Amino acid sequence: MQDASVEALKRKRLKSLEQLTRLEGWTSGSLVETERKSNGQSYPFRYLSRSVGGKNKITYIPSGECKAWEKMLRNGKKAKALFDDITELSIAILKGEKKEES
């Protein structure tokens, strides 16, 4: 029979997994706002910068879509925190189950 603390950890992990699935889309990286010059005039320029395989990749972000991308980046930070929690909980569960077998 499993220890009550292991069961509590499993419930907590399941709750974190459910929170992760409820995020409405997420990404990692940084939203960069700068200016681009053309014909002597400056224009605002925004892009998503992220590291992929050790290289920086950029994705142009139209100005009307900035709020949506900002939300996705916030959700990305939440997702990373949830992944970290799930990892720690999974390790604790495995250790607890292993301890019970001994």
Image (tube, rainbow, N blue to C red):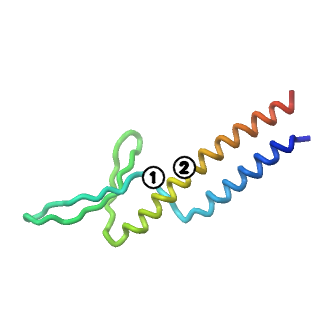
Location of residue 96 (image quadrant): top right
Q: 38 left or right of 5? A: left
Location of residue 63 (image quadrant): bottom left
How packed mark 2 is, by other alpha carbons closer than 10 Å (few <14, some 14-19, many 20 or more), is: some
Q: Position of residue 10 (x, y in %)?
A: 77, 48
Write the residue at 86% across / 44% down: 4
Answer whether labels 1 and 2 touch (C-beta < 8 Å): yes
Q: Position of residue 86 (x, y in %)?
A: 65, 46
Amino acid at circle 2: Lys
Q: In which quarter of the image is the C terminus?
A: top right
Amino acid at circle 1: Ser
Q: In what element is the residue under mark 1?
A: loop
Q: Quadrant of the N terminus?
A: top right
Numbered mark located on residue 92 in the image = none
> Does 16 sit above or below residue 64?
above
Q: 32 left or right of 5? A: left
Q: In what element is the residue under mark 2?
A: helix
Q: Residue furthest bottom?
A: 64
Write the residue at 75% across / 36% down: 94
Location of residue 69 (image quadrant): bottom left
Write the residue at 18% across / 60% down: 36
Residue tagged 2: 80
Q: 63 left or right of 38? A: right
Q: Position of residue 95 (x, y in %)?
A: 76, 33
Nearest to N terminus: mark 1 or mark 2: 1
Q: Where is residue 71 in the image (x, y as percent from the top left)?
A: 46, 64
Q: 28 left or right of 93? A: left
Q: How far apart are marks 1 and 2 (CA)?
A: 9 Å
How packed mark 1 is, by other alpha carbons closer than 10 Å (few <14, some 14-19, many 20 or more), is: some
Total residue callouts: 2
Residue tagged 1: 28
